[in-house]
Image (cartoon, rainbow, N blue to C red):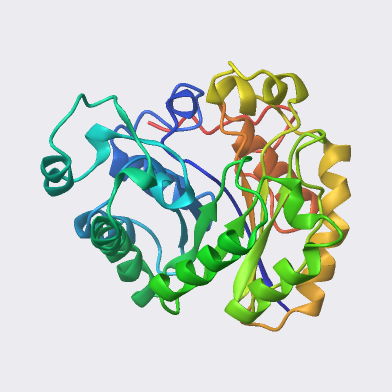
C-alpha cells in the first residue's frame, strides 16, 4: 500500500508564527522547522516561488529534520508564467537586465533563452540536493488561471520535464480548459508519458476553477492540495493572498476526500506516496485542517489533543 503524508504549504507564514502553533523555544528558523518536523513528516517550501534558494539552505533543511522527513518545492514564479520582483533575481541577471527598482515586476518574456536556462539551472541546484538525499517529495509547477490548454503549453510541459531530469514532478493547472472533454485525455496522457503527477485541488467551485478530479499520472505517487473554499476571496480580484486563502475546513468537507485517499493508498504499491498538502495558510488553519484529516484517516492524534481549535503545546 502507498504511504500517506499530510502537511502544510508554508511553515514560515507570518500569520502562523503569530498563531501560537510554535512554542517560545522555537524562536528561530531552525527551531521552528525542527518543531514542525516533530508534528508532521512533509512540508512544501513556498519561499522558492518568490526567490531562488541556495545549496546551503538545502543542507540546512536536511540537517534540521529527521531522515524520513520530505520537502515539496514550489517552482520559482518566472518558470510558471508569473511575474517576479526584480529584486528577487540573482545579481548577475539584474546586471544583465540593466538594473531597476527592486519591486518592479519581471516576466519570463523579459529574459532571453540563455538567461532563462541559466536561471533554471541555478534554481534547480538545491532541489537536486534534496532529491539526491532522498528528501524531495515533489517539485511543483503551479500555473496561473490564464495559462490555458494549447499545443504550445503542452510543449512547455515537455520542456519542464527535460530541464528537471528524473526528479518527481507535480503540475497544477488552474484553468478548466485543461480538463474540457476535448483536451483532458490528451493532457492526462501527456502527464503519464512524462511521469508527472497531476495535482488534484480542493478550491472554490467557480466558473473558471478546475473540478476536484484526481487522476493518477505518475509512477512515484500523487499530490492533492487544499486551497480552502473561500468563494468571496477568490472572486475578489483585489483580495490579498491571505484574504483569498482564509478558510477553515469543516469535518464534512474533508470527509469528501477520506474515501479517495484510502482508495489511492490501497491501490498503490509500497513505494508510491500520497502527499496531502494544506495551502489555506492563514493563522493556524492549515495546521488544524491537516491534523483533523490525519485523525479522520486514523493516522494519529495531535499531541495534546485536537479540539475544534488545537490546544497547541505551550512548551518553553
Please indicate whether residue 162 sits to the left or right of residue 170 in the image.
left
Q: Is residue 63 visible?
A: no
> Which residue is located at x 13 percent, y 45 percent?
96
Question: x%, y% of residue 97?
Answer: 17, 41
Position of 202 relative to 25 (above/below): below
Name above or below for residue 45 compared with residue 28: below
Q: Nearer the viewer, residue 215 or 9?
A: 215
Quadrant in which the N terminus is drawn: bottom right
Place of residue 204 in the rendered image (x, y in percent of width and height, measured from the top left): 78, 34
User: Is residue 84 toward the left or the right of residue 87 in the image?
Assistant: right
Q: Please indicate whether residue 69 sits to the left or right of residue 121 in the image.
A: right
Residue in front for this viewpoint, 231 or 144: 144
Q: Quadrant of the C terminus?
A: top left
Res 281 visible? yes
Q: Nearer the viewer, residue 159 or 238?
A: 159
Q: Quadrant of residue 249?
A: top right
234 horizontally vs 61: left or right: right
- Quarter-of-image position of residue 157: bottom right
Residue at image x 66%, y 36%?
A: 288
Amino acid at each position: 500500500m502507498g504511504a500517506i503524508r499530510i502537511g502544510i504549504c508554508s511553515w514560515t507564514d507570518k500569520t502562523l508564527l503569530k498563531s501560537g502553533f510554535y512554542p517560545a523555544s522555537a524562536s528561530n528558523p531552525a527551531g521552528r522547522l525542527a518543531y514542525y518536523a516533530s508534528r508532521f513528516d512533509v512540508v512544501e517550501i513556498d519561499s522558492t516561488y518568490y526567490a531562488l534558494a541556495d545549496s546551503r539552505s538545502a543542507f540546512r533543511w536536511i540537517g534540521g529534520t529527521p531522515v524520513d522527513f520530505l520537502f515539496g518545492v514550489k517552482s520559482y514564479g518566472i518558470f510558471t508564467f508569473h511575474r517576479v520582483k526584480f529584486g528577487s533575481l540573482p545579481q548577475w541577471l539584474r546586471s544583465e537586465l540593466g538594473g531597476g527598482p527592486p519591486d518592479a515586476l519581471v516576466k519570463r518574456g523579459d529574459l532571453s533563452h540563455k538567461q532563462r536556462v541559466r536561471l533554471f539551472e541555478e534554481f534547480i541546484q538545491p532541489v537536486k540536493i534534496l532529491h539526491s538525499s532522498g528528501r524531495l517529495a515533489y517539485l511543483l509547477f503551479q500555473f496561473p488561471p490564464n495559462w490555458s490548454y494549447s499545443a504550445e503549453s503542452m510543449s512547455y510541459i515537455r520542456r519542464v520535464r527535460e530541464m528537471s531530469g528524473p526528479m518527481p514532478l507535480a503540475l497544477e493547472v488552474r484553468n478548466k480548459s485543461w480538463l474540457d472533454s476535448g483536451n483532458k485525455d490528451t493532457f492526462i496522457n501527456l502527464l503519464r508519458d512524462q511521469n508527472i503527477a497531476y495535482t488534484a485541488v480542493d478550491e472554490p467551485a467557480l466558473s473558471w476553477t478546475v473540478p476536484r478530479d484526481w487522476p493518477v499520472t505518475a509512477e512515484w505517487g500523487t499530490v492533492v492540495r487544499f486551497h480552502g473554499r473561500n468563494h468571496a476571496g477568490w472572486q475578489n480580484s483585489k483580495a490579498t493572498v491571505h484574504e483569498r486563502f482564509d478558510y477553515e475546513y469543516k469535518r464534512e468537507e474533508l470527509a469528501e476526500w477520506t474515501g479517495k485517499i484510502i482508495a489511492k493508498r490501497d491501490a498503490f504499491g509500497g513505494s508510491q506516496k500520497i502527499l496531502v498538502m494544506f495551502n489555506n495558510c492563514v493563522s493556524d488553519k492549515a495546521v488544524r485542517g491537516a491534523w483533523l484529516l490525519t485523525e479522520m484517516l486514523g493516522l494519529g492524534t495531535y499531541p495534546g489533543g485536537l479540539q475544534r481549535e488545537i490546544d497547541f503545546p505551550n512548551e518553553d
